[in-house]
Image (tube, rainbow, N blue to C red):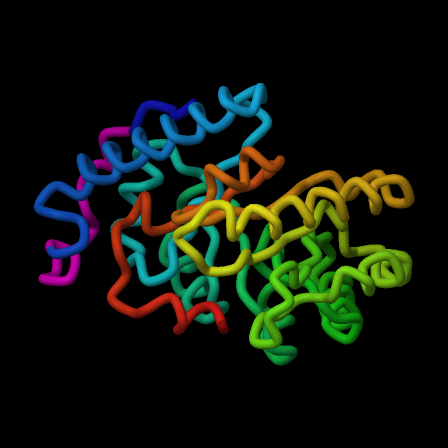
C-alpha cells in the first residue's frame, strides 16, 4: 500500500535534463505512478496465480542511474526503500536525500575496500558470498555500532561469470556466519539465467527456494528469497520470491546495458 505524497515532494529538485525527459517524460511523477501501478498489478496477479497473499512479497525498487531528484519524486509516490548496485552512487544519493526516511540496500557485488561504506549507511546487503567479506562487514558494523541485514548470494545458473556461492557451499557458509554477530542473515539471493523464456529461468528460482528450505532447518532466521528482476519477477513470485528487485519496470530503460551491472 502506498501513502499519499506530500505536496512538497511533488516538484523535481532540479531542472529536468534531456536524459530525464527521454527516460521519465515531461511529468516524471505521473510516469513513476503509472509504472508503479503496473508493477503492483503484475505482482498481485502473480501472487493470485500462486495462491499467495500479496503481503508476502516485498518490492525493492532498484534505482541505479536514477538521479536523486527523481528518487525524491519516487518517495513522493510512496516508495520508502531503494536498492543500488554501486556503493559510490548510493552514497551520493543517500547524502542528497538525508531529509527522507529511506532504507538503502546494496544489491551488487562488493569490493572489499567498499565494505566500510556499506556498514555505515545501508540497511541491507544482498550479495554476501565470501567469509573475508563477511569479516570486513562485521568489523565495520562493530565500529559503527549497528547491525546489517545480509542475504547470501547463490550462483543458481552455474555460469562461471556470475558471482555467488555454489549450492554445495551454502550450509558450511551459514554455519560460519555465527562468528559475525553484527551480521543478520535474512535469506538467500540469486540472479537467474538471463533469458526471456520463463521456463529457462524458473529452475534457478526453484533451486533457491529448495536451498532456503533446507537451510531454514538449521538457521530459522534465513526465511527470505531475494530473486526476480524486471524481466522475470513474476516467475520468481510463482516460485516463492519474498523480495523482488525491480528497476527498469518502474524507472524505465537505462542507457547502459545489463552487462555493465551483472556479469554473464
Q: Nearer the viewer, residue 256 or 18?
A: 256
Instruction: Inspect this view and state whether residue 15 appears.
Output: no
Residue placed at 76% from the left, 67% from the top? 134
Q: Is 17 covered by the magenta stretch?
A: yes
Residue placed at 55% from the left, 58% from the top? 191
Tally the numbered discs.
Answer: 0
Asked which quadrant contains residue 180, the reply is: bottom right
The image shows residue 2 at horizontal and vertical percentages of 39, 25
Q: In the picture provided, is 34 more to the left or to the right than 242?
A: left
Asked which quadrant contains residue 22, the reply is: bottom left
Q: Is 110 covered by the magenta stretch?
A: no
Instruction: Inspect this view and state whether residue 4 appears.
Output: yes
The image shows residue 120 at horizontal and vertical percentages of 61, 62
* Depicted 25 relative to depicted 47: above or below: below
The image shows residue 127 at horizontal and vertical percentages of 63, 61
Position of the N terminus by quadrant: top left
Q: Nearer the viewer, residue 236 or 75?
A: 236
Residue lying at the far bottom in this picture: please name it: 113
Q: Which residues are magenta?
A: 6-21
The image shows residue 145 at horizontal and vertical percentages of 73, 57
* Depicted 220 relative to depicted 96: above or below: above
Residue placed at 61% from the left, 55% from the top? 190
Q: In the picture provided, is 235 more to the left or to the right than 19?
A: right
Residue placed at 46% from the left, 46% from the top? 198
Q: Nearer the viewer, residue 141 or 157?
A: 157
Amino acid at each position: 500500500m502506498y501513502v499519499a505524497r506530500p505536496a512538497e515532494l511533488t516538484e523535481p529538485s532540479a531542472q529536468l535534463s534531456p536524459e530525464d525527459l527521454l527516460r521519465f517524460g515531461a511529468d516524471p511523477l505521473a510516469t513513476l505512478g503509472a509504472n508503479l501501478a503496473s508493477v503492483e498489478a503484475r505482482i498481485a496477479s502473480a501472487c493470485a496465480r500462486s495462491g499467495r497473499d500479496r503481503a508476502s512479497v516485498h518490492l525493492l525498487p532498484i534505482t541505479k542511474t536514477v538521479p536523486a531528484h527523481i528518487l525524491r519524486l519516487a518517495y513522493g509516490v510512496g516508495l520508502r526503500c531503494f536498492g543500488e548496485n554501486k556503493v559510490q552512487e548510493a552514497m551520493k544519493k543517500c547524502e542528497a536525500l538525508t531529509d527522507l526516511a529511506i532504507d538503502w540496500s546494496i544489491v551488487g557485488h562488493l569490493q572489499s575496500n567498499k565494505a566500510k561504506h556499506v556498514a555505515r549507511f545501508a540497511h541491507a546487503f544482498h550479495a554476501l558470498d565470501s567469509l573475508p567479506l563477511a569479516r570486513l562487514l562485521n568489523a565495520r558494523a562493530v565500529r559503527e555500532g549497528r547491525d546489517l541485514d545480509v542475504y547470501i548470494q547463490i550462483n543458481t545458473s552455474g555460469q562461471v561469470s556470475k558471482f555467488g556461492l555454489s549450492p554445495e557451499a551454502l550450509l558450511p557458509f551459514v554455519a560460519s556466519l555465527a562468528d559475525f554477530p553484527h551480521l543478520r542473515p535474512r535469506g538467500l539471493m540469486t540472479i537467474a539465467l538471463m533469458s526471456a523464456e520463463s521456463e529457462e529461468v524458473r529452475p534457478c528460482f526453484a533451486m533457491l527456494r529448495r536451498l532456503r528450505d533446507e537451510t531454514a532447518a538449521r538457521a530459522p532466521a534465513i526465511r527470505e528469497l531475494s530473486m526476480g528482476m524486471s524481466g522475470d519477477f513474476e516467475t520468481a513470485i510463482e516460485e516463492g520470491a519474498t523480495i523482488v528487485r525491480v528497476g527498469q519496470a518502474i524507472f524505465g530503460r537505462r542507457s547502459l546495458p545489463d552487462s555493465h551491472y551483472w556479469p554473464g
